[in-house]
Image (spheres, grey):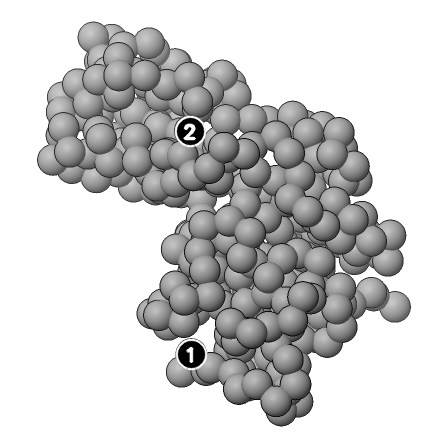
Amino acid sequence: MSTTFFDGHDGLLCDLDGVVYAGGGAIAGAVETLSTLQERGVPVGFVTNNASRAPESVAEHLRTLGVPAQAGQVFGSAPAGVDLLEETLGRRTGRVLVVGSAYLRAVVEERGYEVVASAAQRPDAVIQGFDPGLGWADLAEAAYAVRAGATWVATNLDTSIPRAEGIAPGNGALVEAVGRATGTAPVAAGKPEPRLFRTAAEALGLARPLVVGDRLDTDIRGGNAAGFDTVLVLTGIDTRETAAAAPGPDRPTWVRAHLPALLAGGAAGPAGRSASSRRGIASPNAGRNGAEPAGSSSMTSG
């Protein structure tokens, strides 16, 4: 018999930055929650738009924080970006300028492409992913190549990323810089595209996963597009107010204060309605466990 939690979901697809950790440190209660769920037999997958690290590196980071994690539980935007590159080019040959991490370069090379270092080498495509070491010269090479006609793919378009020190520019902000210089825009993989969530659910054997994230425009939009229930947690980018004002595709099924709220019992609202009939946004007066207090009203997304 399969183990379920939070209104009958059979697994968790969890964002990382702003949900499990900010920078290198864990967010309060996240480690204990993820450990408890896995001890109960709930499958957990980590779905991240960070294209700078390999799955094993991400899993090792999680393990150092105390979260049980293996590389096979990590689903990132770097492979998704290279999948999109292959689809866009229609082949597994050609020169590719990689503006991103060593890991992204390795994934591109593994697929059979020749990685080049500059626009002067006439790349057929540019793939751009987050790496904290990127600088002006890297973005300039991308712009030169795109202006010369190279196909442009971005692993993701997150404009910001939560760090221990605060909110920092994400890959989308760097992509936008290249876009302003070239007057064009890339095709993009990763969240909010639904493929990454569906790939993770299939790999983990999940029929009804719960998607949890801190961003409406990536985690929630992508989870909704994949056809899954979604939870916005308030430990990263978005807030109760932005959730209440969000358009339909970006409205979460529930809003909770933090990841530990997923252990607080059933997901039904105070009127006892199920997830299929509500898109609950917890009130600003929600209790410490992130759930709506008795007698509060819930909002529907329509």
Say left or right for 81 vs 287. Answer: left
Residue corresponding to mark 1:
301
Which quadrant of the view contains residue 244?
bottom left
Residue flagged by tag 1: what amino acid is it? Ser
Residue flagged by tag 2: what amino acid is it? Phe
- Residue 20 in the image: above or below residue 268: above
Say left or right for 106 vs 177. Answer: right
Say left or right for 87 vs 57. Answer: left
Residue corresponding to mark 2:
130
Which quadrant of the view contains residue 270?
bottom right
Percent coordinates x, y for residue 141 in the rendering: 24, 16
Q: Residue at x 59, y 48 (%)?
A: 19
Mark linked to residue 43: none
Query: Of 64 and 186, which appears nearest the observer?
Result: 64
- Residue 1 in the image: above or below residue 178: below
- Residue 36 in the image: above or below residue 292: above
Q: In this rendering, does residue 156 appear at all?
A: no
Helix, strand or loop at label 1? It is loop
Q: Quadrant of the N terminus?
A: bottom right
Q: In this rendering, does residue 52 appear at all?
A: yes
